Amino acid sequence: MHYTIRHITRFHYTHPVSESLTEARMQPITDANQRCLNFELSTSPEARIMSYRDHLGNIVHNFDIPGHHSKLTITAKALVDVQDPAPLPDSLPISAWKELDSIVSRDDFYEILVPSPFTQATPLLAEFTRELAVGRDDDPLTLLHRINSGIFQRFDYAPQTTRVDSPIDDALRARKGVCQDFSHIMIALVRQVGIPCRYVSGYLFHRTEDHDRSAADSSHAWVEALLPGIGWVGFDPTNNLVAGGRHIRVAVGCDYADVPPTRGVFKGQAKSELSVAVSVLPSTEPAPTQMNYSPILSIGSHGAEPDWASEEFAQQIQQQQ
């Protein structure tokens, strides 16, 4: 299936700012089941946009607007071809745990096996672990299905009840949140039993007949877990789905901190207001004869990294719904 994606991010400043630096992870991934056929990124005010691959392989666009401005608009357009993954078996043999442990011992999965900033172990997580009876009693695939559906059944989808930087305890305590929260909770649970698990940032194509809980006008998030003999499999706890041909992958990381759609700072005595509009539609456009991308630089050659934590700048970042 071919999709056209349009993602518009607008920042409005209460007073003009003198400089803003932004990075965007909005270009869909190209891999075995997905091809990004065309991608364009533009800004208003105009900026010279450069791009590079981060250490996780994600394409990052970055730009600096040095002049005074009171608004910033970032528009990303993409044409993507997504294929359905191969069907999953009903279950795996219990010996799959041994195979998985062997894979983990041979390869480097350290970053996606240990707690990351948004997937820290807490007493509330321990309680939820016991509630779902998370352990190695089931085979790995059956356990992942059970965690996926367990989160879906026990949490309400409620936008604006958590923040972009909310710890998982906020959602665990209230039993509500958005896709970002549910993905972090699932990652934390899955890593506890030794399954490599990563955060996926992207989009979901919504159809009326699917009754998805997630917002159609926002970016989306889910998780991918590594299974022996199968590879990476996506699970969407927000909608109780196995990721398939409607899930469009943009970036992967240990958690949300690695893959926000936009991340930036600005200089000035102002507050910023964020608005986001996303559309994902089926496309009948033919594949372009020439790809339209920004030049990709090697890691480390894109210039000085902004000091995101500097007191001189105020941060701005968008949450995934």
Image (spheres, rainbow, N blue to C red):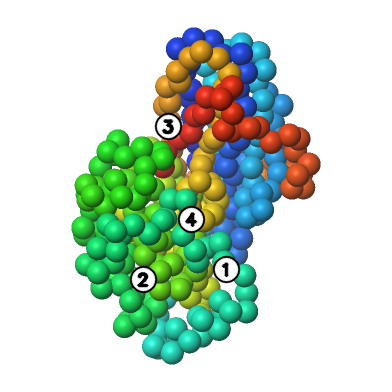
Q: Are marks 1 and 4 in contact (CB under 8 Å)?
A: no
Distance between mark 4 and mark 2 Cα atoms: 19 Å
Q: Which amino acid does label 3 sit on?
A: Ala
Residue 106 showing in the rendered view: yes
User: x%, y% of residue 73?
Assistant: 53, 23
Q: Does label 4 or label 2 sit earlier along the sequence?
A: 4
Circle 4: is it few (<14), some (14-19), or many (20+) Cα within 10 Å? some
Q: Mark 2 points at which residue?
A: 144
In which quadrant of the rendered view does residue 292 lie? top right
Front residue of 196 and 58: 196
Front residue of 73 and 115: 115
Image point 53% across, 36% down: which residue?
Answer: 262
Q: Name the residue under label 1.
A: 109
Q: Name the residue under label 3.
A: 277
Circle 1: is it few (<14), some (14-19), or many (20+) Cα within 10 Å? some
Q: Do the residues labelled 2 and 3 touch (CB within 8 Å)?
A: no
Circle 3: is it few (<14), some (14-19), or many (20+) Cα within 10 Å? some
Q: Name the residue under label 4.
A: 116
Distance between mark 2 and mark 3 Cα atoms: 32 Å
Front residue of 206 and 219: 219
User: x%, y% of residue 144?
Assistant: 36, 71
Q: Does label 2 or label 3 sit earlier along the sequence?
A: 2
The mark closer to the camera, 1 or 2, is: 1
